[in-house]
Image (spheres, rainbow, N blue to C red):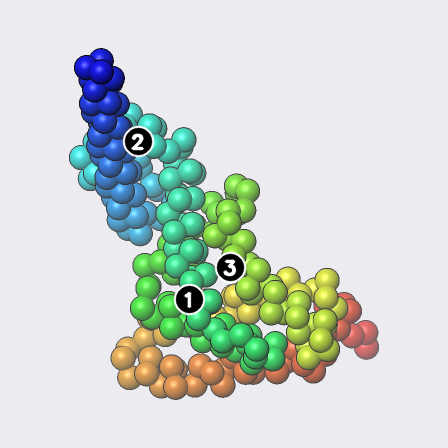
Amino acid sequence: MHRHHFGDHHEEHVERRRRRHEERRGETRDDILAAAREVLLERGATDLSLREIARRAGYSPGALYKYFKDKGDLVGVLADGAMSALAGAFETVPEGLSPDERAVEIGMAYLDFARSHPEDVELIAVNEAAIHARPSSPEHERVEEVVIGVMRDGARSGVFRLPVEDADYAAFGAWAYVRGLASFERRQGSELARKLRSKQRQLLNVYVNGLKTGWPASADPPAD
């Protein structure tokens, strides 16, 4: 009985140590990610220095490799966090809207997100090459499915006059369009930014309505 009692206490002690280790590991990982986010936003992905990240996080450079395989892995984790937050913003768009209405509301959700989470948008923008250089993450696929999915739905239903197989191109164009609007607003003075915000829905409708008017099979200019 005494041996059994000792065994129970030993197992509890081992479990407590395991939990403390996991908590410390999680805190260290969070410290590294916070420092990496700071350096990344300052310098961009090209000049990201693991040594500088370690210095700011208060760890040795070697400690970073206990939590991340390499710089690409670290950048990917940060970008995935930003993508996950953006996907959450897209999920606030009401269901049941027609594809054209939904496309506009997704665009507005992006612009609202860019206004309230500029660092996340910047993180996504400056690291898109790094994101696409590795297999798509679930977070990236969530965002892609929303943006391409609404274009695909519009093509299938006939709301958008484009082939279903071209839905991704329409989505890429929409992505570039809203990114450009968000970037332009962020770089203007408060008065012009306010005026731009008041017209953003109309500007999104211009793009979406264009998808209803036709989609030529070829991008080549017409012959004389």
> For this rendering, which residue is in front, 196 or 80?
80
Amino acid type assigned to the residue bearing label 3 in the image? Val
* Residue at 70% over, 72% down: 155
Residue drawn at 49 percent across, 85 percent down: 202
Which residue occupies 24% across, 36% down?
Answer: 23
Residue 185 - label: none
The image quadrant where one finds the N terminus is top left
Q: Distance between the residues labelled 3 and 1?
A: 10 Å
Q: Which of marks 2 and 3 is nearer the N terminus?
A: 2
- Mark 2–mark 1 contact, CB under 8 Å? no
Q: Where residue 64 is drawn, which disc sits there?
A: 2
Residue 80 visible: yes
Q: Relative to 153, is 104 on the left or the right?
A: left
> In front here: 192 or 70?
70
Residue furthest to the top in view is 3
Instruction: Point out the residue furthest to the front here.
Output: 1
Q: Name the residue under label 3.
A: 143
Residue under label 1: 89
Task: Say which label, 2 or 1, has the lower sequence index.
Answer: 2
In terms of depth relative to the viewer, which is nearer, 152 or 39? 152
Neighbour class for label 2 at 10 Å: few (<14), some, many (≥20)?
Answer: many
Q: Distance between the residues labelled 2 and 3?
A: 29 Å
User: Disc 3 on helix, strand or loop?
Assistant: helix
